[in-house]
Image (cartoon, grey):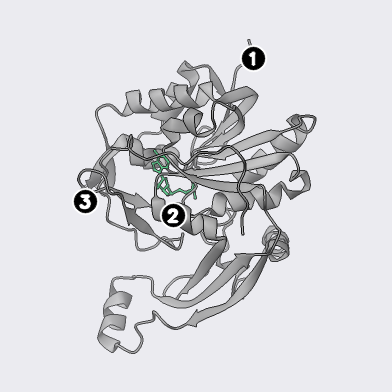
């Protein structure tokens, strides 16, 4: 069980009202996060996509680990916030990577999805292996099935290392739902799924955090825009808000164009959010975004432009966009 960090308060998600209808789930992406989607009780529909995975976009996580170890090693307390933690995989991955500093690193996961947070607090994770999909060997992508199942692909050295680490912190539970959700019994549904290239769950395995491990990870229901209230004004050294900005800054999914549409006030929404995060950052603190944030926002420039306008500079480069890690320029 994951322990509770003192003085974190449960914040209502009342301020969350950005309508984003994007029910279309891409067929070729492993849809991770065992809750997948959740509807919020807000006015109208709100579909929260809890797509996530362990060690997702590993280059960014590795950058954060190295940065923390290099620049914050002399601090008494290092506070990390995962601002859209979904079912917890991002928080736990960082907890594992930074375990050597566990006595001073505190990692707080915030998400606006109530069920996602409940699930994260349980410390249990279900892995799914799909029938019509490759098992995935790209660490930068979502797929983390190599942690739970033997795959046909040879594991890279990096994957082997991560698997070893994972096994140190996780143990399988007795719950193995082999072929439970498979529609193989129903030939017609199986045929339809194959035709549509829909992933079919072939096997599920549940893992839980080993007793006493990762006690520096904490989860709380809330809206990232309330970060100051949630952390009671305590500042953070690292804030991640990865693969979530589109929830706030796009309106709907345009099925004809096959992409989301930025809302009119997207730039204002992003600027307001970055200002809030900036106020919550300690000196030398860093902000981290997803590797496809620009694509998800449907405008590669919008986020870097706002960040530069507010005094941030990029710290790394990614193949797809300017940077995922940003720091305030020193005066
Ligand atoms: C696609 S998941 C990304 C999870 C994780 N950060 C990752 O990269 O794997 C997006 C998450 O953002 C959450 N979210 C969206 N808007 C939010 C907000 N304003 N505050 C907190 N969480 C939010 C959703 O509930 C969802 O769980």
Is residue 298 visible to us here?
no
- Crowding at dot 3, Cα within 10 Å, few <14 / some 14-19 / many 20+, comes out as few
Q: Nearer the viewer, mark 1 or mark 2?
A: 2
Q: Mark 3 against mark 2, which lies toward the viewer?
A: 2
Image point (52%, 23%), residue name: 278
* Residue identified by numbered label 3: 255
Camera-near label (1 vs 3) is 1
Helix, strand or loop for disc 2: helix
Residue at 54% from the left image edge and 64% from the top image edge:
125
**Mark 2 packing: few (<14 Cα in 10 Å), some, or many (20+)?**
many
Q: Are marks 1 and 2 in contact (CB under 8 Å)?
A: no
Residue count near mark 1 (Cα–Cα under 10 Å), binned few <14, some 14–19, many ≥20: few
Q: Is mark 2 within 8 Å of ligand 1?
A: yes
Could you say whether the residue bearing mark 1 is in a helix, strand or loop? Answer: loop
Quadrant including the N terminus: bottom right
Whole-percent x, y for residue 226 in the image:
44, 31
Quadrant of the snapshot with the C terminus: top right
x then y, percent, for residue 250: 30, 38
In whole angstroms, how far apart are the C-alphas of marks 1 and 2?
Answer: 37 Å
- Dividing the picture into quadrants, the one containing residue 156 is bottom right
Q: Classify mark 3: helix, strand or loop.
A: loop
* Residue that carries the numbered disc 1 in the rendered image: 330
- Most distant residue in the top direction: 331
Query: Where ligand 1 lies, by image quadrant?
Result: top left
Give how far apart the Cα atoms at labels 3 and 2 are.
27 Å
Report the residue marked by disc 2. Answer: 116
Answer left or right for 68 relative to 123: right
């Amino acid at each position: 069980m994951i322990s509770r960090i003192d003085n974190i308060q449960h914040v209502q998600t009342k301020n969350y009202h950005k309508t984003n209808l994007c029910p279309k789930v891409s067929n070729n992406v492993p849809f991770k996060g065992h809750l997948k989607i959740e509807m919020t009780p807000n006015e109208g529909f709100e579909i929260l996509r809890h797509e996530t995975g362990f060690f997702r976009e590993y280059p960014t996580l590795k950058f954060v680990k190295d940065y923390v170890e290099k620049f914050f090693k002399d601090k008494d307390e290092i506070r990390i916030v995962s601002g859209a933690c979904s079912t917890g995989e991002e928080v736990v991955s960082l907890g594992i990577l930074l375990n050597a500093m566990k006595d001073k690193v505190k990692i707080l996961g915030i998400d606006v999805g109530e069920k996602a947070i409940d699930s994260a607090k349980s410390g249990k994770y279900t892995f799914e292996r799909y029938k019509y999909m490759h098992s995935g060997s790209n660490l930068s992508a979502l797929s983390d099935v190599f942690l739970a199942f033997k795959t046909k692909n040879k594991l890279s050295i990096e994957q082997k290392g991560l698997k070893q680490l994972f096994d140190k912190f996780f143990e399988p539970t007795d719950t193995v739902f082999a072929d439970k959700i498979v529609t193989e019994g129903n030939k017609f549904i199986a045929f339809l799924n194959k035709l549509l290239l829909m992933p079919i769950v072939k096997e599920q395995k549940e893992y839980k955090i080993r007793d006493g491990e990762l006690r520096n990870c904490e989860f709380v229901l809330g809206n990232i825009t309330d970060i100051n209230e949630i952390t009671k004004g305590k500042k953070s050294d690292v804030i991640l808000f990865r693969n979530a900005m589109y929830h706030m800054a796009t309106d709907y999914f345009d099925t004809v164009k096959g992409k989301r549409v930025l809302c009119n006030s997207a730039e204002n929404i992003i600027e307001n959010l970055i200002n809030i995060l900036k106020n919550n950052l300690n000196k030398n603190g860093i902000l981290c975004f997803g590797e496809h944030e620009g694509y998800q926002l449907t405008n590669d420039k919008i986020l870097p432009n706002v960040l530069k306008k507010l005094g941030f500079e990029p710290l790394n480069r990614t193949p797809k966009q300017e940077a995922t890690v940003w720091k305030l320029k020193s005066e």
